[in-house]
Image (cartoon, rainbow, N blue to C red):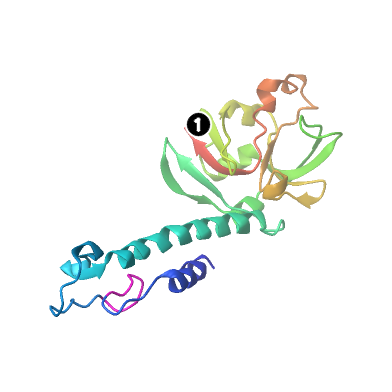
Amino acid sequence: MAWLILKSHIRKIAPTHSNCGTLTGFPRPRPVRSEGEKPEKLWQSGPDGLSCPRSTAIFQRTPLLFDLRIVAAALLISSLHASPSQAQDIYYELDGGVVSGGLYADAIMELPVHELSTSTAVTEGIQHFEGHLMRDVLALLRREEGEVVTLGALNGYEIEIPMEDFHRFDVVLAHSMNGERLSPRDKGPYWIVYPRDQHQELQDIRYDIRWIWQLNRIEIR
């Protein structure tokens, strides 16, 4: 869909000229005949040293930037309107910055399901969560022995969590709350949930800030 948007807008906006085509599938520029001298300020070198009108060269560059913004906006809107029932992939990094691939939703969904009912610092009453234990997710990556796990969110939020948390507590990578799949508009696709009602020490701001939602990236160090 993004390619169709980009292509259609370029065809609509990009100008044509008898001597200079655009850079997006139109005919290549033809040399200007020596008949009649053209005003120098209106002409400039095009591809292969050929001459093109300055106005045309400007328009050849402008639509691309404009349409890339449209594509970016379209991709953002499509992610926000993704079906809540669709599981999302998580991209992960190992050892400080080398992107090694994706943790695919199908693999995550095959893990044992863990249910947890608890209060949260951002909702009222008891909420019922479904998902998978984070230690099982890390075991799926075969990296459960690291020291620090950095989690990143769609909204740019990032938090470092000691690996010890996932071994001491039943921390859940939640994909559903109260029977509804979490969407990006409602803290999805994944939300890190601590069993705060089962452990008094977890009812503390130091742990509340680790409840990262809109999770889409795991980095292990």
Quadrant of the rendered image containing residue 94: top left
Residue that mark 1 sits on: 146
Residue beneath the point at 50% across and 31% down: 146
Query: Based on the displayed image, in which of its 4 quarters is residue 76 positioned?
Result: bottom right
Residue at 47%, 42% (x, y): give it.
93
| Residue 25 versus residue 205 in the image, above or below | below
In screen coordinates, is 72 left or right of 126?
A: left
Residue 186 position within the rendered picture, expressed as x and y whole percent measured from the top left = 73, 46
- Residue at 72%, 58% (x, y): give it: 85
Percent position of residue 208, x then y: 70, 27
Q: Quadrant of the N terminus?
A: bottom right
* Viewer-closest of 6 and 217: 6
Secondary-structure class at tag 1: loop
**Residue at 62% across / 59% down in the picture?**
78
Q: Is residue 22 magenta?
A: yes
Locate residue 128, reporting x and y percent. Answer: 82, 41
Tag 1: residue type? Gly
Which of the pair 142/194 is nearer the observer? 194
Q: Which residues are magenta?
A: 20-28
By secondary structure, the bulk of the magenta-drawn segment is best described as: loop
In this view, which residue lies farthest toward the left?
34
Describe residue 14's horizontal placement relative to residue 163 as left or right.
left
Q: Nearer the viewer, residue 140 or 43?
A: 43
Q: Indicate left or right for 218 with 53 as reference.
A: right
Question: Is residue 131 something that shows in the picture?
Answer: yes
> Is-magenta flag for residue 161?
no
| Position in image of residue 82 (x %, y %) | 66, 58
